[in-house]
Image (spheres, grey):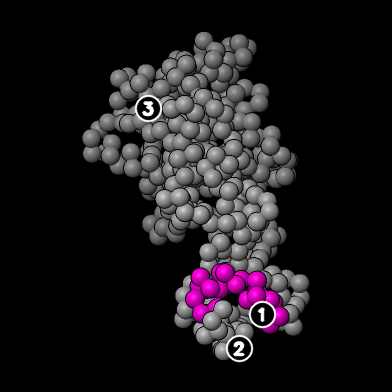
Amino acid sequence: MRPLDGITVITLEHAIAAPFCTRQLADLGARVIKIERPGVGDFARAYDERVRGLASHFVWTNRSKESLTLDVKHAESDPILMQLLETADVLVQNLAPGAAARLGLSYAALHEKFPRLIVCDISGYGVDGPYRDKKAYDLLIQSESGFLSVTGSPDEAAKAGCSIADIAAGTYAYSNILAALIQRGRTGLGCNIDVSMLESMVEWMSYPLYYAFDGAEPPPRAGASHATIYPYGPFTTGDGKTVMLGLQNEREWGLFCDKVLLQPNLTTDPLFSSNSRRTANREALRAIILDVFAPLTAEQVIVRLDAANIANAHMNDMHDLWEHPQLKARARWVNVDTPAGKVPALLPPGVPNTYTPRMDAVPALGEHTDAILAELGYDAAAIAGLRTQQAI
């Protein structure tokens, strides 16, 4: 038995934040019915064609779901939605601001009829406040939250290479839904969860926020290096590869000087004898490190770092990541079905010893429409009529 077996989630979702949330609920066993626009579906289906003709974002965030095509603005959709919600535990939506309320799908509209229903609203800025109606895409929230101000090189800001604001919001939606299910088990009542992408990202920005507390200077943009700890970041080796390493304290600094740089006298050099001094003189120290690494390959440097118990990592690209030996050794890849055939998928982080995460197929658009409507009592003629009316 999986933790959420028997839980049903109805989701009006698109893009990343809500689909990532509900896919994680599906991983735990929940039945997730994804309502999509007839003909086109979730617009993330058309982001690219990188996975054998399927979109990379969609394949990532939509496995183990059932796809029901339904025009939620059509007159025939309301009875279908209400029937679905009668037996649902959770409704998730990240439609445009105010759209769910206009469809009669707000918590206020649903709570009296479905008191056990948990309604999770995911938006850019929250359900109220002066920014409520602003459009909010991932990059815009990275900017609005201050993330871009501390990420990139000294000369140019850089966005995160993945949808970090969407992921943050989806993660908080997921964890709050799990908490709400526990609470409902005690009270018998559902609740309304309001997840803001901005607030999710600001929570993740708390370290630089506090670093700049009371008008202090914020951490500078430092590329792939740490802005306030040194040495901590990428260093090129003699074979042209890059090794990432990091020191956290003075004991490690001494080991690094002695066993990696082979220059124990640097430990007490007044230019480098504390983290703040190393940070202030990072260019001088960087030159010393690169000079030591120049005759060595990346693997030789890593051997030295491991021998000194200094934290380090390879600078992997996506091809390296597909072949990562640690993921292979821990059997973290499994195959899932898609409309284009089987593709590998990473098992959800966390290794439960009592159940196997659900890893079912990525659905084709509308794949489950007829079956779901049949469950609700619609016969073949009625379903054909809905299709003729373009309601499904």
Q: Which amino acid does label 1 sit on?
A: Ile
Q: Which amino acid does label 3 sit on?
A: Thr
* Marked residue nearer the N-terminal end (1 or 2): 2
**Quadrant showing the C terminus:** top right
Q: Does residue 369 appear in the picture of this structure?
A: no
Give how far apart the Cα atoms at labels 3 and 1 are. 66 Å
The part of the image, by quadrant, that contains residue 341 is top right
Query: Do residues under tags 1 and 2 come within 8 Å of each other at their CB atoms?
Result: yes
Left-right relation of 166 to 47: left
Seen at 51% across and 70% down, the residue is: 276
Mark number, residue 263? 2
Residue at disc 2, secondary structure? loop
Residue at disc 1, secondary structure? helix
Residue 143 colored in magenta in the image: no
Q: Does residue 241 appear in the picture of this structure?
A: yes
Say which of marks 3 and 1 sits in front: 1
In the image, residue 95 above or below residue 314: above
| Neighbourhood count class around disc 2 (C-alpha, 10 Å): few under 14, some 14–19, many 20 upward | some
Residue on which disc 1 sits: 288
* Marked residue nearer the N-terminal end (3 or 1): 3
Stretch in magenta: 272-292
Query: Do residues under tags 3 and 1 come within 8 Å of each other at their CB atoms?
Result: no
Residue 313: image x %, image y %?
60, 70
Q: Which of 282 and 201 is in front in this view?
A: 282
Give how far apart the Cα atoms at labels 2 and 3 are. 69 Å
Say which of marks 2 and 3 sits in front: 2
Seen at 41% across and 57% down, the residue is: 352
Residue on which disc 3 sits: 87
Query: Do residues under tags 2 and 3 come within 8 Å of each other at their CB atoms?
Result: no
Residue 109: image x %, image y %?
37, 18
